[in-house]
Amino acid sequence: MANTAKTAPQPGSTDPSLLRNFCIIAHIDHGKSTLADRMLQITGVVDGRDMRAQYLDRMDIERERGITIKSQAVRLPYTADDGVTYILNLIDTPGHVDFTYEVSRSLAACEGAVLLVDAAQGIEAQTLANLYLALENDLQVIPVLNKIDLPAAQPDKYAAELARIIGCDPDDVRRVSAKTGVGVGALLDDVVRLIPPPVGDSNGPARAMIFDSVYDTYRGVVTYVRVIDGHLSTREKIVMMSTGATHELLEVGVISPDPVPSKALGVGEVGYLITGVKDVRQSRVGDTVTSALRGATKSLGGYRDPKPMVFSGLYPLDGSDYPELRDALDKLKLNDAALAYEPETSVALGFGFRCGFLGLLHLEFVRERLEREFNLDLISTAPNVVYRVAMDDGSEVIVTNPSEFPSGKISAVFEPMVRSTILAPSEYIGAIMELCQTRRGVLLGMDYLSEDRVELRYTLPLAEIVFDFFDALKSKTRGYASLDYEPQGEQDADLVKVDILLHGEPVDAFSSIVHKDKAYTYGVMMTGKLKELIPRQQFEVPIQAAIGARIIARESIRAIRKDVLAKCYGGDISRKRKLLEKQKEGKKRMKMVGRVEVPQEAFIAALSTDDSAPKPK
Amino acid sequence: MPSTPPEGSPAPADGSLPDSALNGIGSRPFGIYVHVPYCASRCGYCDFNTYTAEELGSNASRAGYAEQAIAEIRFARRVLGDRDLPVSTVFVGGGTPTLLPAGDLGRILGAIRSEFGLLDGAEVTTEANPDSVSTSSLAALRDYGFTRISFGMQSIAPHVLSILERTHTPGRALAAVTEARAAGFVHLNLDLIYATPGETEQDFANSLQAAIDSGVDHVSAYSLIVEDGTRLAARVRRGEISNVDDDVAADRYLQADEALSRAGLEWYEVSNWSLPGGDCRHNLGYWRGDDWWGVGPGAHSHVGGVRWWNERHPNTYGERIVAGRSPAQAREVLEDEVRRVEDILLRVRLREGLRVDRLTNLGRDVARRAAEDGLADPAELAAGRVVLTQRGRLLADALVRDLVD
């Protein structure tokens, strides 16, 4: 079965006409990793014995969730049906909405893409968005239906759907089972035949595009590049064109599937380089690498600084873990150019960090790594977006934490907007439109992908999406809808800050910036929730929601009247004392807001968005 | 006794106590508690260490109980040495002590008398189930030297007794009080339980009035507690009956305090009220940190800062006693700070109050705030004692959490 060529072309001296650079565009569980595994096996790069399921997903979390976040590139020598040995570079792409920019750079490193769709589910919104991105980049797209071995597969239906979207013949849609391997060999031959080889100036000054950058404890930053023009050699001095920083190439090489150092990377080739830098910010995705000597003067373009879109306060549950949290963030930052954070103090939650993320998944991913790899117990505040507040006096305030919303005379508040695509069975159109309407969405257009599947396009405030939009969408469509969105400027909106006051004291962690029309609902929801979560105190505790000095909602926690155990349990004083000790422990975990004791759990529960909005039945 | 014993360190097989515990013994009142772990049937709310004949499989252990208790009393004497140590209070509790023949209780008391001696005017109490006493058994107890009987009345309302799964009729406890008085008992207690689901304010008023009218000199009133593992807890979990409502319990407590004090029964401990001279001195010993030896399965003891508790099962307990070994399952030797915390925890429940000098500066601030907030009596505080107000008694545990700082 193994198809390794004994005399495969070597890195640094591979004729571009023998190269095929491609990626797989697929939704999270549509089988991308399994297909990649099968390709590794068929090309003999990994033999069956060593086959670890989903070889390319290195991190535990990724393997557990079955998603790939950091992309990699593997060099696969493959002898095609024409008897010639080609080099296939499979470039893995991140599969989530938060990483659109990284996806676009991965796509820019390729000439073609395999569009992989589950034959039982059809295309999903993120896949569609990435497909459009690939088409914009002029990539040759090979449509493939996976999981044709499943009893629930409907290959004819979804082949028609894909054909309609791409504008090809349904017969051109390949059918494979990555699990059993059926059709994968033929697909590799199609990759060779249909995807064009890279074209570049082999004698020109070196220009290589960074499409990924990964921190490795032992090697420092490992940078993945696609050489567009010229070549890069070991020991050569290089320049990062966005910053002008110079580094020495300590090592260049290819991944196959373990790193193999080589003398050079030639035109059209894909590989890695190591310069000894310790922070991925010094080797940024999208940047152009050139030679320090007689280098290119013009970059490849397309570089963009990662811009945090969603912010959340991260606090250690145990205040004494603050230094550990700081160290952990410092470490994660080495491998995550998009992660931004700065120290923040909350009256309610103590010392923590205000962190900026590309999106919700990015947030969740970082939080999970902090908890898992660094053993930290964290509270995160409800995610919010960045607001630009224009004041009457002409000044401007950027708000990344709702409690810092200015209180002076405000002339306008601007919030970030997104352009979103929702794919769903057509029976849910009404429900989706209703949802988008309540989330201040504006319909841009609607298209039928097939008889019973529809694509809806909306502009929506990002703030509405980060709240609980995705959960609501899933529940209104029984899990059938998929969502993708991309930033699209900002809009002036009627936004206000709602504060929550406990016994007259504002609780910073609960302040929220909401649309004026929803302030009352938010106030009622939050005060009601807190009433349930905060235990009764020795005095009555009013809970109020306020916009400035105006109270818009109010609840109150009645004073506790009895807190005494009547019995002495036949002289078992030890039991009584142990109960006291346990209660004292519980008291330690309370946060004081003025004179009110609030259990940490109440903060966590109140801040979780899970049940913050009434779920449709 | 609760369903699970506390954790502790191993107790020595010979029961020996550190010198620190034995020093000063005899300078404080010394009591003996005798736990009789038998009941005719188990009440639905009860999680005490007690067994029905059915649960034990045979009556053998019940018949041999007195001998075992006497053996432990002799063991106690050996451990405590031959110093002069007359007993000031004896309390026989359960379970249902009166399930044993009065003669057994008499022999146990006799052993206490011969091993330690009873102080003049010693208080000798037994608990009794109204169902399991008669005129003659009460007279016999009086003859043996018992001075006080505590009856479990719980409620006068039949539907409340039925939820509690008490087997006696509403009037039986009151009749037993009359019989006991006829037998010569002056000191009598009735236990009441309030806030049972389904009990109305009027039900409890009737119970209080009946207890007052019976002329007893002592009333204990406890809020029903739904303890884990009881049949009552299972019924609450299944939704057959609602749980105890703390606000209702607070109302009932106030109701009890008002009614009892109007009748001349003053509180001397959070859950206990008495006519002058009617305090239960044995119980006061628990709250004051006095010394007592607990005899019987699962019984707790305290001597000079060492607390221990016996093996809970009558069979295990019996084996230890027969082998001449300490029946203690585990013990705790309390450090000074723990003793201070316990002192606060216990004494603050008493009408006589807690001496302010047991508190740290932080604790004294808490006491001052408590007085300002109406939880402690300001005049008493000025005189150097923390004495809880009516509202303070209802929030005693919350206050203790701060006072111990």
Image: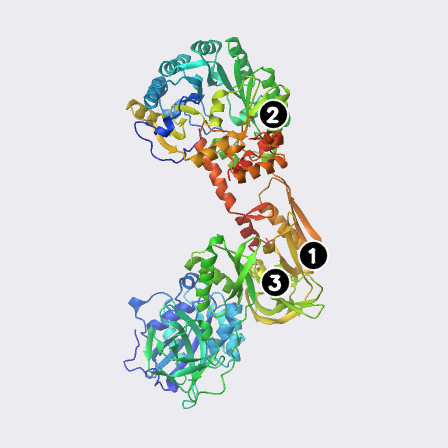
| Cα separation between marks 1 and 3 | 22 Å
Q: How many numbered marks does the figure carry?
A: 3
- Measured from the top left, where is residue A167 in percent x and y? 53, 78
| Cα separation between marks 2 and 1 | 48 Å
Task: Identify the residue at the far bottom of this view.
Answer: A203
Residue A182 image-quadrant placement? bottom left
Up-down relation of residue B210 to residue A432 (above or below): above
Answer with mark 1 or mark 3, whichever residue precedes in sequence: 3
Query: Which disc, if any, is residue A464?
Result: 3
- Measured from the top left, where is residue B367 in percent x and y? 57, 36
Closer to the camera: disc 2 or disc 3?
Answer: 2
Element type where label 1 sits in the image: loop
Q: Amino acid at mark 3?
A: Glu
Residue A562 seen by the camera: yes
Element type where label 3 sits in the image: helix
Asked if marks 1 and 3 fall on the same chain, the answer is yes
Residue, disc 1: A548
Q: Chain of mark 1?
A: A
- Measured from the top left, where is residue B274 in percent x and y? 56, 20
- Measured from the top left, where is residue B60 in percent x and y? 34, 19
A106 sits left or right of A437 in the view: left
Q: Chain of mark 3?
A: A
Considering depth in this image, is B166 or B353 the residue closer to the camera? B353
In the picture, which quadrant includes the N terminus of chain A?
Answer: bottom left
| Cα separation between marks 2 and 3 | 56 Å
Residue, disc 2: B256
Query: Which disc, if any, is residue A44?
Result: none
